[in-house]
Image (cartoon, rainbow, N blue to C red):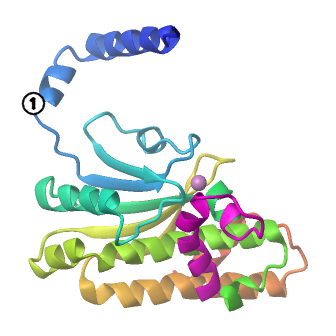
């Protein structure tokens, strides 16, 4: 029989440390949770929700799956969104993708990966929808970065299109949906500047977000250098739009 002794020991030390800093922390937390944020992110072990935004237990409601997908028939994800919006009344939902996402990469490979390909089909649909835009990057690393970004924007739109969010907006609930992407190699979140706070803002925010990636394509095509990283490209795009 194997027990995870090391992890259980670490847990005890962690609880002791928090208790020392704030003796009422767990007692208060056990009575209620009132997070203002719902994080929908990738299951990737390198993208831990609370740590990235430096939040304590109780501050972030979290749903994670392979490649941060929001699929309308996924009762797990829909139930999380419903609970977060209707019961916890979160004010923000952020869809957080990450560069170098293995699921996104696998989605556009030709060899089969088994059952998971049915899940990844949703990303392949994103790829097909934006094939023209993505064809500007024959460099596969750049193309993967852009597909990771487009996937975030599409999934953020899917959140907006849920009956749950539509009903909350119809009732004038304070709720904004955001699209973010995280850099594994620098620990920084890149804000894709999709921020929708009402049903009528979704199309505009979607159009703006896509036009920024189109601008990025123009910059790449005008540039000699093919190896610019995402942050450099996005800083340029932002200086043009803002
Ligand atoms: Co991932």
Q: Is residue 142 above or below residue 61?
A: below
Q: Can residue 20 be seen in this view?
A: yes
Residue at image coords 66%, 55%? 102
- What is the span of residues highlighted in magenta in the rendered image? 106-130
Location of residue 142 with respect to 60 vertically, above or below: below
Instruction: Report the residue at 27% width, 55% height from top.
Output: 80
Picture coordinates of residue 167, whole percent (x, y): 15, 77
Q: Quickly name the residue at label 1.
A: 31
Position of residue 240 measured from the top left corner of the image (x, y, whole percent): 61, 83
Location of residue 188 with respect to 56 vertically, above or below: below
Identify which residue, 203 or 120, lies in the foreground.
120
Q: Hey, which quadrant is residue 238 in on the image?
A: bottom right
Per the picture, the main secondary structure of the magenta-coloured stretch is helix
Secondary structure of the residue carrying tag 1 is helix
Residue 202 is situated, as x and y percent measured from the top left of the image, at: 35, 84
| Residues packed near mark 1 inside 10 Å, few (<14), some (14 to 19) or many (20 plus) | few
The residue nearer to you, when weighing 189 against 88, is 88
Ligand 1's quadrant is: bottom right
Q: Residue at point 40% right, 70% down?
A: 71
From the viewer's perspective, tell me whether residue 57 is left or right of residue 154: left
Left or right of residue 242, residue 139 in this image = right
Q: Is residue 128 magenta?
A: yes
In the displayed orientation, state which residue is furthest to the right. Answer: 224
């Amino acid at each position: 029989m194997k027990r995870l002794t090391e992890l259980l020991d670490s847990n005890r030390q962690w609880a002791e440390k928090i208790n020392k800093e704030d003796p009422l922390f767990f007692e208060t937390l056990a009575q209620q949770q009132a997070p203002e944020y719902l994080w929908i992110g990738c299951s990737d072990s390198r993208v831990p929700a609370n740590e990235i935004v430096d939040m304590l237990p109780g501050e972030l409601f979290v749903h994670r799956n392979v490649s941060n997908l929001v699929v309308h028939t996924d009762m797990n994800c829909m139930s999380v969104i419903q609970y977060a919006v209707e019961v916890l009344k979160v004010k923000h939902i952020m869809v957080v993708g990450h560069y170098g996402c293995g699921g996104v990469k696998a989605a556009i490979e030709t060899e089969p990966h088994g059952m998971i390909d049915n899940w990844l089909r949703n990303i392949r649909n994103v790829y097909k929808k934006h094939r023209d835009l993505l064809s500007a990057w024959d460099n596969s690393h750049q193309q993967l970065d852009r597909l990771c970004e487009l996937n975030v924007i599409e999934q953020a739109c899917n959140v907006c299109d849920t009956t749950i969010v539509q009903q909350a907006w119809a009732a004038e609930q304070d709720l904004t949906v955001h699209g973010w992407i995280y850099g594994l190699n620098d620990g920084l979140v890149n804000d894709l500047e999709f921020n929708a706070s009402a049903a009528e803002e979704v199309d505009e925010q979607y159009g703006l977000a896509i036009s920024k990636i189109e601008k990025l394509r123009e910059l790449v095509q005008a540039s000699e250098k093919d190896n610019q990283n995402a942050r450099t490209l996005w800083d340029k795009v932002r200086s043009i739009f803002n």
